[in-house]
Amino acid sequence: MDKLENSATQQGAILLLSGPSGCGKSSLLKNLFQNIDHYYFSISTTTRSPRVGEEDGVDYFFVSKEEFKKQIEKKQFLEWAEVHGNYYGTSILPINEALEKNKLVIFDIDVQGFEQVKDRLGDITTSVFITTPTLDELEKRLVNRKTDTQQIIEKRIKNAKEEIEYIDQYDYILINDDLEIASSKLLALASIAKLKTSLIDKERFLHSWMKF
Ligand code: 5GP
């Protein structure tokens, strides 16, 4: 994929979170959203079926495989990937709009999506890999949340073992052992993410800094 150039007006930043299903990303994000402003949470498009309590346009945009493929052909995704047998993708348009408004754009995407975003918008991205302290703990949480069948849980565990291999590619690792402690660490990382500016921003800054 082509690298997306930041326009001179684009000053937002990206906080990209990945981590196996069941590591507690949703709870951490809920806490984060209560404590930050001027952010945009990227709502992904997916072909997976909604879980109980999930709403279209709030948790995901739920579409058919045909519709998803159409959007790939029209190059509407910043990134997309097949995860656990379903397609997931991030639409470019709302991301660009949020970045132009200088917002902190937050992604919850898998490791394949992370690699694509890093390639295209790496200069404004801060990445965090979230995980449970152990694989055992992950399995316990997946079983306890009672949203998936045993077969799906096994698929997610298998995927988790593959995803953890990418842990060293991320800027930060967040072990979600205690939710309160992990939440305050994520809040700190969100502040750090906002401080990461693109090269073009720096050039513009230097230009005005030298003038006075
Ligand atoms: P879940 O089905 O549990 O909601 O999500 C499964 C996995 O898909 C998670 O690892 C999540 O981070 C990832 N995911 C969700 N949205 C996207 C997306 O837009 N792109 C990519 N690449 N992964 C996504």
Image: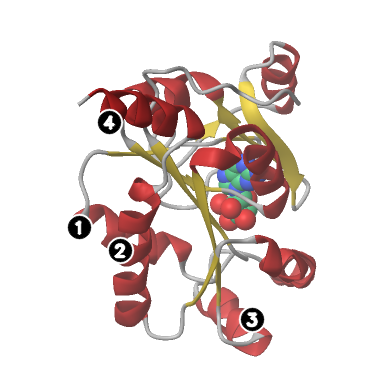
In depth, the one of 202 and 148 nearer the eye is 202
Q: Name the one closer to the observer, 68 or 201.
A: 201
In space, the residues marked 3 and 1 are separated at their CA atoms by: 29 Å
Which residue in the structure is indicated by mark 3?
139
In the rendered structure, the answer to whether residue 45 lies left or right of residue 179 reads: right
Q: Which label number is shown at residue 209?
A: 4
Which label lies toward us, 1 or 4? 4
Whether residues under marks 2 and 1 lie with C-beta atoms below 8 angstroms apart, the answer is: yes
* Left or right: 48 as drawn, with respect to 210: right
Which residue is label 1 attached to?
A: 35
Determine the residue located farthest toward the top in the rendered image.
74
Disc 2: which residue:
187
Give, as a three-letter code, the residue at label 4. Answer: Trp
Left of 159 or right of it: where is 201?
Answer: left
**Element on which disc 1 rests:** helix
In the rendered image, the quadrant that contains the N terminus is top right
